[in-house]
Image (cartoon, rainbow, N blue to C red):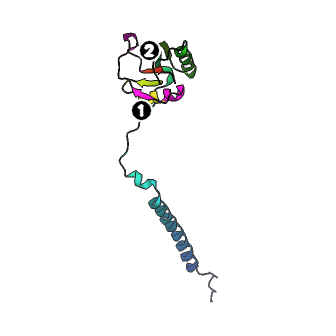
Amino acid sequence: MEHAPPFTRPFPWRLAILVASALALATLGGLVLTHQAERTRPAAAADHAPKKPLAAPLRPRFRISVLVLNGNGLSGAAGGLATDLLATGYHHAIPADAPSLDYARSLVLFRPGWQREAERLSRDARIPTVAPLDGRVAPEYASVPLVVILGAN
């Protein structure tokens, strides 16, 4: 007796190869596009540049003391600015008279290592001139890192 072979359909090899090829091309195409994007990225050149050391964060205002000197002779000028600085958040703002009352312009002076805080103070006080402290301050103010001298301007 003869048996009829069971009906089996042959495996669709062509379709399987086409699907696998399409997946491979899609994956490879994505890798090529990603590689091209990385090559044309402007920051890629900076990745190989020498790194600058990160600057230390600014000291917070509530930890900074400021000496405010009246160098223009106007009564209450130093006290007014000291009050404004305290309202801005500075720890201490000590008003006093400068050794001379004939300063033409206002200045923000700083001790070594305090330049960035002095620049912020100059913005807070709206005084454009910032310079290193090159003179001596009275001994009772030797620990104060920032000094403001109010001039006639």
Residue 11 is one of the magenta-drawn residues: no
The residue mark sitting in front, 1 or 2, is: 2
Which range of residues does the magenta coloring cover?
Answer: 120-145
Above or below: residue 74 compared with residue 27: above
Label placed on residue 95: none
Mark 1 falls on what kind of element?
A: loop
Q: Residues within 10 Å of mark 1 (few under 14, many from 20)?
A: few
Tell me what residue is drawn at x 54 percent, y 16 percent.
77
Q: Position of residue 51 (x, y in %)?
A: 37, 45
Mark 2 falls on what kind of element?
A: loop
Name which residue type carries label 2: Ala
Q: Residues within 10 Å of mark 2 (few under 14, many from 20)?
A: many
Q: Position of residue 114 (x, y in %)?
A: 41, 26
Tell me what residue is drawn at x 46 percent, y 15 percent.
101
Name which residue type carries label 1: Ala
Tell me what residue is drawn at x 48 percent, y 64 percent.
31
How many marks overall?
2
Q: Quadrant of the N terminus?
A: bottom right
Q: CA distance from mark 1 to mark 2?
A: 32 Å
**Residue position for label 2:** 98
Any part of residue 114 in sight: no
Q: Quadrant of residue 10?
A: bottom right
Label placed on residue 56: 1
Any part of residue 141 in sight: yes
- Between 37 and 75, the one lying in front of the other is 75
- Between 100 and 42, the one lying in front of the other is 100
Q: Position of residue 5 (x, y in %)?
A: 62, 85
Q: Position of residue 4 (x, y in %)?
A: 64, 86
From the viewer's perspective, tell me whether residue 111 is left or right of residue 88: left
- Between 125 and 59, the one lying in front of the other is 125
CB contact under 8 Å: marks 1 and 2: no
From the viewer's perspective, tell me whether residue 25 is left or right of residue 99: right
